[in-house]
Amino acid sequence: MSGYPKSYNPFDDDVEDEDTRPAPWKDARDLPDGPDPPIDRQQYLRQEVLRGPSATAASTSRSLFLMYESEKIGVASSEELVRQRGVLEHTEKMVDKMDQDLKMSQKHINSIKSVFGGFINYFKSKPVEPPPEQNGSIVPQPSSRLKEAINTSKDQESKYQASHPNLRRLHDAELDSVPASTVNTEVYPKNSSLRAYHQKIDSNLDELSVGLGRLKDIALGMQTEIEEQDDILDRLTTKVDKLDVNIKSTEKKVRQL
Amino acid sequence: MIPRKRYGSKNTDQGVYLGLSKTQVLSPATAINSSSDIAPLPTPVALVPSPPDTMSCRDRTQEFLSACKSLQSRQNGIQTNKPALHATRQCSEFTLMARRIGKDLSNTFAKLEKLTILAKRKSLFDDKAVEIEELTYIIKQDINSLNKQIAQLQDFVRAKGSQSGRHLQTHSNTIVVSLQSKLASMSNDFKSVLEVRTENLKQQRNRREQFSRAPVSALPLAPNNLGGGPIVLGGESRASRDVAIDMMDPRTSQQLQLIDEQDSYIQSRADTMQNIESTIVELGSIFQQLAHMVKEQEETIQRIDENVLGAQLDVEAAHSEILKYFQSVTSNRWLMVKIFLILIVFFIIFVVFLA
């Protein structure tokens, strides 16, 4: 009776061997009695092993998407900073124009105050020559660093749009890889699956590294731009203070008239 | 009016008491309360002699009643106390919020110091990874909550800015900016601590790889007995061919060791990837905060631009008005000059004819 179940088990082993491996392996498989538990455990461990890299690949894909999103936000912020720089420069030119208007008003008030004021203006007006106003609207020129960073990042817009289908491809790849790993029980498909996952992880990490480098360029460019805008704001504050003093003195003289 | 006044006085009492941060008897607090109600400005002057004064309750009660009567008679005529109490109440709320944020900042700094001490430890076997991860998570959440609280405080200051005076508004803005700068410095410290931790993890991994190569070199010892085959399942199957049954257990154990090594490698890689992902999430939030600040600055610069444009238009209008007045004055002067010349001519003619 004990010999009959043994003869039954090798038959199943023979069927499995015929399905998965060539004929010479058959004799080797006949000799051991109970290969079933190790094979099941190996399959379980194989699935466990494949779960780790798939999670890591999904994590790298999500990181890549977040990086592209951050890059997009950085580019938008940089453009906003450039526009603010234009507004600040426009404000500065308006302040200069107000300063010149106040000087002309001062001259007219001097001539209004008394008849001899005209002679005073005549003597004064020679050294005080107002510079010719540049009517051309100067386009705000940001720092070259920020400009290069923005241009480099705008070239990556297609990659940003591709990151969404990248996630979809990842899901499709996962759906395709799971039945493949369950169908094939050999060692080679497991290695190829692991190799594919690791190659995908490595390529995602390389792309992530390049993207983080671009983010660093954007951040440094924004830093330079903000420092330059700080200088513009300080200069503008000084000019506005002078303008305030001039306006007050002019108002006082006008009230005296 | 009396119940409202009492409620306001209680709030003032709480504000003054919390501001003083002293433990005093109730009757001196009442005296301080009455003095602050009458005239808020001399409060520091009144605070100096109050600790040595220890009067009886009866006298203080009478003073309090007289103060209530005077306030009641004053409130019948003038209602200026209400906005003062309202401003004081909001100032107290602002102070409470700022103090709470400051306390949370100090607590988070203490946690960051603890994390720094743990992260700087470089031993291989005494690594407290769980504690470091927990502290990192807690500090991240604290930083996020502090960010939200400072944002709420800033909104509160903006909502209150139109009601209070300029000095109070400047003071509030200064406090908000100082809290933000403290939070920024703490974030920088946290970033540096995480970088130190990353370096230590790399060094530990290098050491672990050096140590983990020993079992890899120990594995060929078993196949050396059989014939020195490589660690491949094919070689193992050949070994199983040569020796019938005894090699099944060693083969399985070797395979399990290989799988465990791969699993640990993949697990460590997955953990590292999780850390990288969380760092990139933080980077995304930093960029979003920067975009938010740039947008606020855009609103401010837009307002500056409009104000300067309005000022320029006003200056141009004033200039044109001065020009018109100047022209009229000039024409008047020329008219006076002409009349004077005509008079001179007639005077000369008159003198010639008379002579």
Image (cartoon, coloured by chain):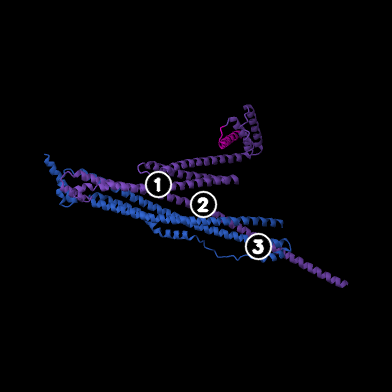
Chain A, hue in figure: blue
- Disc 1 and disc 3 in contact, CB within 8 angstroms: no
- Disc 2 and disc 1 in contact, CB within 8 angstroms: no
Position of B73 relative to B144 (above/below): above
For marks 1 and 3, give the CA distance.
66 Å
Q: Residues within 10 Å of mark 3 (few under 14, many from 20)?
A: some
- Magenta span covers which residues? B1-23
Is B247 situated left or right of A168 in this image? left
The residue tagged with tag 3: helix, strand or loop?
helix
Q: Amino acid at mark 1?
A: Arg
Q: Chain of mark 3?
A: A
Q: Chain of mark 1?
A: B
Look at the image and tell me whether residue A169 can be seen: no
- The residue pinned by badge 1 equals B197
- The residue pinned by badge 3 equals A104
- The residue pinned by badge 2 equals B296
